[in-house]
Image: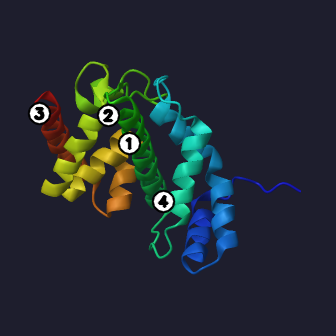
Amino acid sequence: MELSKNIGDDGIKLLLDAWKNGDYSARDKLFYHLYDELNRLSAILIHHEHRLSLSVGDLVSEASMRLMKIHSTDWQHKSHFMALAAKMMRRVIIDHVRKRDAQKRQHHRVTMITGLFEDKILTNYLGVEAKTIDIIALDKALAQLHELDTSKADIVEMRYYGGMSIEEIAQVMSTSPSTVKRSWRAARAWLLGALEK
């Protein structure tokens, strides 16, 4: 008998709580129930980049392995989990690009455009026309922003990499959507300036 994947946010929260308390079968059920969403998030991140030899399934698997190593996270809700999943997927992609660059001794530019937002992500999110961005330069800029303002860097990660809405980010950060919007505008302006240098 196949399990239903539609257990709702309350069911996901119960699984997150059980996993936090050491129930690894709850962890496995959680990944089963969120597999489609993790796959979609993975596809969003690598949709238009053919030069990456990382498949959607590989990215989900590698990020899931990293997530499974986290033992005592105080999971707040599903959005919190998905935000961390997006962060892990970003790290997997960055590690993959760095490894390839080290082997080839050259940088590759990638198009960070999503299937969810199509070609509008750079226009809508970063305020520039869709174009390729050096993923290593973007990672360095995010690291600099993280040193200056951790919450703004987290918002960029959740919005840009995770495709999360302002409301979902507000839920993860336990703040108001208007506060997230203000921080997003400031972070976007800073990031654009850093990428133009």
Q: Residues within 10 Å of mark 4 (few under 14, many from 20)?
A: many
Residue 90 percent across, percent down from the top left: 40, 45
Q: Which residue is mark 1?
A: 94
Q: 85 and 104: which one is in front?
A: 104
Inspect the image, locate mark 3, and give the three-letter code of the amino acid beneath it: Gly
Please rate how many residues cluster around mark 2, counting C-alpha atoms within 10 Å: few if below 14, some from 14 to 19, many from 20.
many
Q: Which residue is mark 2?
A: 135
Q: State which quadrant residue 17 falls in.
A: bottom right
Vertically, is 87 above or below 132?
below
Distance from the alpha carbon under mark 4 to that under mark 1: 20 Å
| Residue 60 appears left or right of 32 | left
Name the side, left or right, on which 145 lies relative to 97: left
Label 1 to label 3, Cα distance in Å?
21 Å
Mark 2 vs 3, N-terminal side: 2
Of 14 and 144, nearer the camera is 144
Q: Position of residue 51 (x, y in %)?
A: 46, 24
Tell me the distance, in whole angstroms, between the alpha carbons under discs 2 and 3.
16 Å
Residue at 37 percent across and 60 percent down: it is 172
Q: CA distance from mark 1 to mark 2?
A: 7 Å
- Disc 4 residue type (three-letter): Phe
Q: Tell me what residue is drawn at x 56 percent, y 39 percent.
A: 40
Please, is residue 169 above or below residue 130 in the view?
below
Crowdedness near tag 1: few (<14), some (14–19) or many (≥20) residues, C-alpha within 10 Å: some
Q: Secondary structure at mark 4?
A: helix
Tell me which residue sits at (28%, 45%) in the image: 156
In the rendered image, the quadrant that contains the C terminus is top left
CA gap, disc 4 and disc 3? 30 Å
